[in-house]
């Protein structure tokens, strides 16, 4: 990705964070589902398959968000670790995006640092092709296959 692409994805992440901050200060301000130890934060936004993809952490949820650069929000995106299904959403103050929930509610997180670490680990795993690789297969031992020991007389 070019620096311009990274900057565009980061700008989209910042716009999403601002929209979710307004939601946190408005309709979600006194919601019992909110964890008061947490704040809104957009993490790791990068361009992928025509979308800015990253994690948004809020006091009530954390999830992958895919904001299309053009067109409709995706229903499924492929990543090195595998494919993920997304649900289209309209984020007030931002517009159309798609989300894939990681955590909700957020009561398992004592601090913003804890939530941030979990979000970064999930995002890192998403782009790790090793997570989707099949387990290594053991070498085939023909003698063992037929019930013979190695070195046994035939």
Image: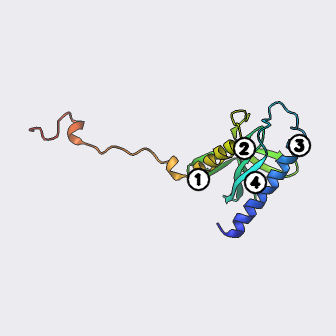
Q: What is the number of the mark on residue 112? A: 2
* Numbered disc 4: secondary structure: strand
Q: Residues within 10 Å of mark 2 (few under 14, many from 20)?
A: some
Find disc 3 in the rendering and name its residue: 25
* Numbered disc 1: secondary structure: loop
Closer to the eye: label 2 or 1: 2
- Residue beneath the point at 78% across and 58% down: 12
Q: What is the number of the mark on residue 115? A: none
Front position in the image: 81 or 45: 45
Find disc 1 in the rendering and name its residue: 127
Percent position of residue 33, x then y? 80, 32
Percent position of residue 106, x then y? 73, 36
Measure how far apart labels 4 and 3 are at the Cα level. 22 Å
Vertical position of residue 140 compared to residue 79: above or below = above
Which of the marked residues, 2 or 3, is nearer the chain's N terminus? Answer: 3
Closer to the eye: label 2 or 3: 2
Measure how far apart labels 4 and 2 are at the Cα level. 24 Å
- Residue beneath the point at 17% across and 35% down: 148
Find disc 4 in the rendering and name its residue: 67
Percent position of residue 41, x then y? 76, 49
């Amino acid at each position: 990705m070019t620096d311009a692409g990274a900057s565009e994805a980061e700008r989209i992440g910042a716009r999403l964070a601002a929209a979710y901050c307004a939601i946190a200060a408005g309709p979600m301000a006194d919601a019992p589902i909110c964890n008061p130890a947490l704040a809104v934060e957009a993490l790791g936004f990068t361009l992928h398959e025509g979308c800015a993809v990253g994690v948004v952490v809020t006091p009530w949820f954390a999830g992958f968000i895919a904001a299309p650069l053009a067109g409709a929000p995706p229903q499924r995106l492929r990543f090195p670790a595998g494919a993920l299904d997304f649900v289209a959403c309209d984020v007030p103050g931002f517009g159309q995006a798609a989300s894939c929930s990681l955590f909700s509610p957020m009561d398992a997180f004592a601090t913003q640092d804890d939530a941030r670490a979990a979000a970064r680990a999930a995002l890192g795993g998403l782009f790790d092709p090793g997570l989707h690789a099949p387990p290594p297969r053991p070498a085939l031992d023909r003698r063992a296959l037929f019930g013979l020991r190695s070195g046994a007389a035939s």
